């Protein structure tokens, strides 16, 4: 095959993957996910800052009949180290589907994240601290009058009784993970006597800082990284100050 038509073929696969990303992340535009020609190293997708927050991968795309998978992974990994993002190799050949190759460890973490996100009961079994269950009966209320400045508050009465008030409006549009983060945060105040922590941390293979603790003063439970690092956040709640990755 001539080089120019091989390049065109590579570009088509890149556009295909670009369109897939845009379909799943409708807030992004073609300007956020750009197809770039990078000479002999194959085609890349270049992500804007917004795009790499939503889709934190270093993407290499191949459209070849006989793919040298190891050589391609080597390129993907070089690319990944440069960008500080998880490596992702997308590949196809004529008349095939488009596939991706990821590190197995990362892939299983993703499957685990999806499973946890879809099954609220399972995740609470895994992480709800036993010692607090007795204290919690009857101590949550939905509050339609809570100021919209707050998604929830932990109210402490003069006799020491503690009540978690949850803003009905926020609750109604929060997804499962945002609800979980909100409740864990308030339980942190009410049951574990924790204060806010504004500490930020940059996880391995990330290019931006994220909260180190669920006690961060602003809700972030609907973020991708809350799902990815959920185990850390639950762990840190019980062990204040524990750093991500330590
Ligand atoms: Zn708080």
Image: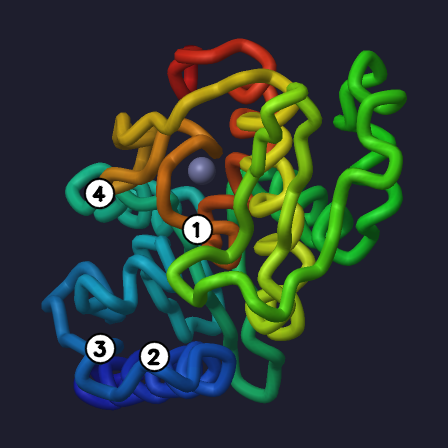
C-alpha distance separating marks 4 and 3: 16 Å
Instruction: Report helix, strand or loop for mark 4.
Output: loop
Q: In the rendered structure, which disc, 4 or 2, sits on the residue that comes first in sequence?
A: 2
Mark 4 CB lies closer than 8 A to ligand 1: no
What is the quadrant of the N terminus in the image?
Answer: bottom left
Q: Residues within 10 Å of mark 4 (few under 14, many from 20)?
A: some
Residue drawn at (22%, 43%) of the image: 208
Instruction: Report helix, strand or loop for mark 3.
Output: loop
C-alpha distance separating marks 1 and 4: 17 Å
Residue at the spot of label 3: 32
Q: Which labelled disc corresponds to residue 14?
A: 2
Q: Residues within 10 Å of mark 3 (few under 14, many from 20)?
A: some
Residue at the spot of label 4: 207
Q: In the rendered structure, which disc, 1 or 4, sits on the residue that comes first in sequence?
A: 4
Residue at the spot of label 1: 220
C-alpha distance separating marks 4 and 2: 23 Å
C-alpha distance separating marks 1 and 3: 22 Å
Image region (quadrant) for ligand 1: top left
């Amino acid at each position: 095959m001539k080089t120019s038509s091989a390049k065109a073929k590579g570009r088509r696969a890149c556009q295909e993957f670009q369109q897939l990303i845009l379909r799943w992340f409708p807030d992004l535009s073609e300007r956020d996910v750009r197809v770039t020609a990078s000479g002999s190293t194959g085609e890349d997708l270049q992500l804007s800052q917004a795009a790499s927050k939503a889709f934190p991968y270093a993407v290499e795309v191949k459209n070849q009949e006989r793919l040298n998978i190891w050589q391609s992974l080597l390129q993907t990994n070089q690319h990944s180290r440069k960008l500080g993002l998880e490596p992702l190799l997308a590949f196809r050949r004529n008349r095939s589907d488009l596939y991706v190759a990821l590190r197995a460890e990362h892939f299983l973490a993703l499957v685990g994240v999806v499973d946890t996100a879809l099954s609220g009961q399972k995740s609470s079994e895994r992480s709800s601290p036993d010692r607090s269950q007795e204290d919690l009966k009857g101590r949550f209320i939905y509050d339609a009058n809570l100021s919209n400045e707050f998604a929830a508050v932990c109210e402490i009465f003069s006799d020491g009784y503690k009540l978690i008030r949850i803003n009905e409006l926020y609750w109604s549009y929060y997804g499962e993970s945002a609800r979980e983060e909100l409740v864990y945060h308030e339980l942190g105040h009410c049951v574990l006597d924790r204060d806010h922590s504004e500490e930020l941390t940059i996880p391995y293979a990330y290019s931006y800082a994220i909260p180190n603790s669920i006690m961060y003063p602003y809700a972030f439970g609907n973020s991708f990284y809350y799902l990815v690092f959920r185990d850390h956040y639950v762990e840190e709640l019980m062990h204040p100050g524990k750093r991500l990755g330590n």
